[in-house]
Structures are given as C-alpha cells and as structure tokens.
Amino acid sequence: MAELIASPATIEAAGDPPKLIEEYAGRASTGEERVSVARMRSPAGWSEPGQRPDFDEYTVVLRGALRVEGEDGAMNVGAGQGVLVPAGEWVRYSTPDGAEYVAVCLPAFSPETVHRDPGT
C-alpha cells in the first residue's frame, strides 16, 4: 500500500547564507539508504563548498536558477530544467539570485559520503 509522507525533516545545510532543506525520503527523515529526495529553498547569494560525492545527484529547478560548477566548466540550470552530477565528479552549487529545487541522490545523501573540499 502507498505510504503518505506527511511532512519532511528539516536538515541543516552547508553554505552561506543558510538555505532550507526539507527531506521527504532519505537517511535523516526515514532511514532510507537507497535514495534521498529533498526540496531546497535557497536564498540569493547562497553558495556551498565544493564536493566530490559518492552518489549520483539529480536536480530539477522549480524556480530561479542553480549555478553548477564542475571541473570542466559551469552552467546555470533554470526553472523547468534539470541536471545530473554523476558520483565521483567534483561539483560546487550556488544560487546567485535564489532558487527552489528538488534534489534526488542515489544512494541517499550522507555527510560521510559527500566529501566536501578540505578546510570547509
């Protein structure tokens, strides 16, 4: 039978200024290790440290734009667009003008497997 997820867990985010992470499925909210699904609401000027995660991350932008920097360049992902960052790729996210987006990580996001840049 289908299972209602009545409300998400609020997760502390890396980066500055703070963004809101609402996890609907994943290690923090449900104990699910196979996948995490979270809605992000990120203010203008937010950025986080670079990272080289052990998970694939699919992101769909609902409003605004997400800046995605990689070793081979950078792109802006706008509302109605999506991006895949494969596991093992270096990436840094930011929202110069603010954004709302949904991120899906396979396997689920974990602070131990995100591998943020040293000194951050």
Image (cartoon, grey):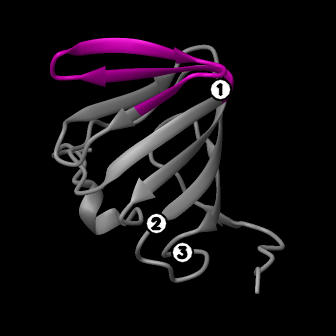
Badge 3 crowding class, 10 Å Cα cut-off, few under 14, some 14 to 19, many 20 or more, is some
The secondary element bearing badge 3 is classed as loop
Q: Residue at x 57, y 34 (%)?
A: 60
Where does the image place residue 11, in percent across and percent down from the top left? 59, 62
**Which mark, residue 35?**
2
The answer to whether any part of residue 57 appears in the image is yes
Q: Nearer the viewer, residue 120 or 92?
A: 92
Q: Residue at x 60, y 69 (%)?
A: 25
Where does the image place residue 113, in percent across and percent down from the top left? 26, 63
Amino acid on which disc 1 is placed: Ala
Measure the C-alpha gap from mark 2 to mark 3.
11 Å
Q: Residue at x 76, y 80 (%)?
A: 2
Asked if residue 74 is positioned above or below residue 60 in the image, the reply reads above
Q: Earlier in the sequence, mark 2 or mark 3?
A: 3
Q: Nearer the viewer, residue 79 or 43?
A: 79
Badge 2 crowding class, 10 Å Cα cut-off, few under 14, some 14 to 19, many 20 or more, is some
The stretch drawn in magenta includes residue 13: no
Q: Earlier in the sequence, mark 1 or mark 2?
A: 2
Magenta range is: 62-83
Where does the image place residue 43, in percent across and percent down from the top left? 66, 28
Where does the image place residue 108, in percent across and percent down from the top left? 41, 66
**Which mark, residue 28?**
3
Q: Quadrant of the C terminus?
A: top left
**Location of mark 1 (residue):** 99
Q: Dominant secondary structure of the magenta stretch? A: strand
